Amino acid sequence: MEKNNIIFGPINSRRFGMSLGIDLSPSTKQCNFDCLYCELAPMATVDAQSEVVEIPTIISELKKHLSQSIDVITLTANGEPTLYPYLSELIDEIDKIKNTTQTLILTNSATLIEEKVFNALLKLDQVKLSLDAISNDVFKKIDRPHENININDVVDRVKEFSKIYKGKLFIEILFVHGLNDTKQEVEKLNNVLLDINCERIDLGTIDRPPAYPVVGISYKELHEVSLIFDSSLPIHIASRVHAEPYNAYYSDEEILNTLDKRPLTMDDINLLFDTDSMARLKNLIDKQKVVKKVVGNLEFLIPHANEKRKLKK
């Protein structure tokens, strides 16, 4: 992988395609969160960048690496990319040269409370918002936010953003063992997500060495958590850390019931089903009782009977 201070990649992302990254804080970590699970070293939170890369420098580097094979230009950072003070202007400049390539940002959602950031993100083709907890105490334990960041305010803005945003919106929840993986917290997340319009909800867990001594949850536990969410929500298990195959038996009825409750990708199927169940699934696909539906670069299997009501924004 070719990498320099500002541009990195391209990286073949299973969720977003061929991605070329722009690091808006290449020299140091600048973030309004100090998440327990962060792969970067712990550092005091900030509410503004003190070290800023100029737009012409970013665009000059981007032009050197941008090609037709790139699906998305991903705005990210050693920290929180929406702290970049010229984000709106940068997006305008990228739009001038991107052609058919999509723009994507990976953000922790907190700065959506600021009108300038809110409006800047509306310009992007794709937005991925993190939302790890709804309870204020759990939010503070996991994400360790900068002072005066209130999760209720953030949730309200995420809901508002989802109602008017015209691009593809993704929500990501990262589960930490013993903190936000409780049934009570998942139910609170579920109730909020039912009022958010999004393309897909990605459930993940810790898959890199974390900043603090915390651990993730297993694929089995992620699958069990996914079943707590309402079946109308476009849930996707994004992380397969410590994924041990179930190799379980599923009858035709059980396959249809499982896919009705939670649409699955073939990666999920390969972990959950035994060989005979895989053959039964193939037969259901051949009979068009199970169909495939693409959502945000991923292919899900769902029952034909509820094709129209599942996984829609």
Image: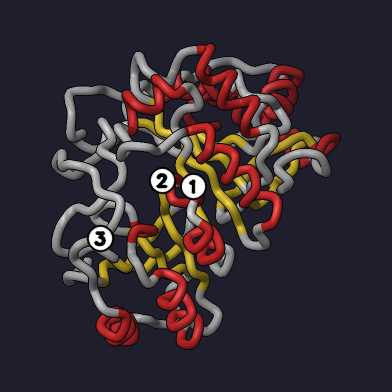
In the image, is residue 311 above or below residue 248?
below
Q: Is residue 23 left or right of residue 170?
A: left
| N-terminal label among 2 and 3 | 3
Q: Nearer the viewer, residue 31 or 270?
A: 31
At which x and y percent is residue 74?
Answer: 40, 64
Q: Amino acid at mark 2?
A: Asn
The numbered disc on residue 129 is 1
Q: Are marks 2 and 1 in contact (CB under 8 Å)?
A: yes
Residues packed near mark 3 inside 10 Å, few (<14), some (14 to 19) or many (20 plus): many
Give the label, 1 or 3, closer to the camera.
3
Q: Is residue 72 above or below residue 214?
A: below
Q: Left or right: 253 with respect to 179?
A: right
Residue drawn at (52%, 24%), measured in percent from left and top?
A: 272
Which one is nearer the viewer's eye here, 89 or 299?
Answer: 89
Q: Which disc number belongs to residue 49? A: 3
Q: Pointer 2: what residue?
A: 108
Residue shown at 20%/62% (left/top)? 50
Q: The residue under label 3 is which amino acid type?
A: Gln
What percent of the width, then of the height, locates residue 235?
59, 35
Report the Cα–Cα distance between label 2 and label 1: 6 Å
> At numbered mark 1, what does the secondary structure look like: helix, strand or loop?
strand
Report, in whole angstroms, how far the alpha carbon at label 2 lies from the one at label 3: 16 Å
Q: CA distance from mark 1 to mark 3?
A: 20 Å
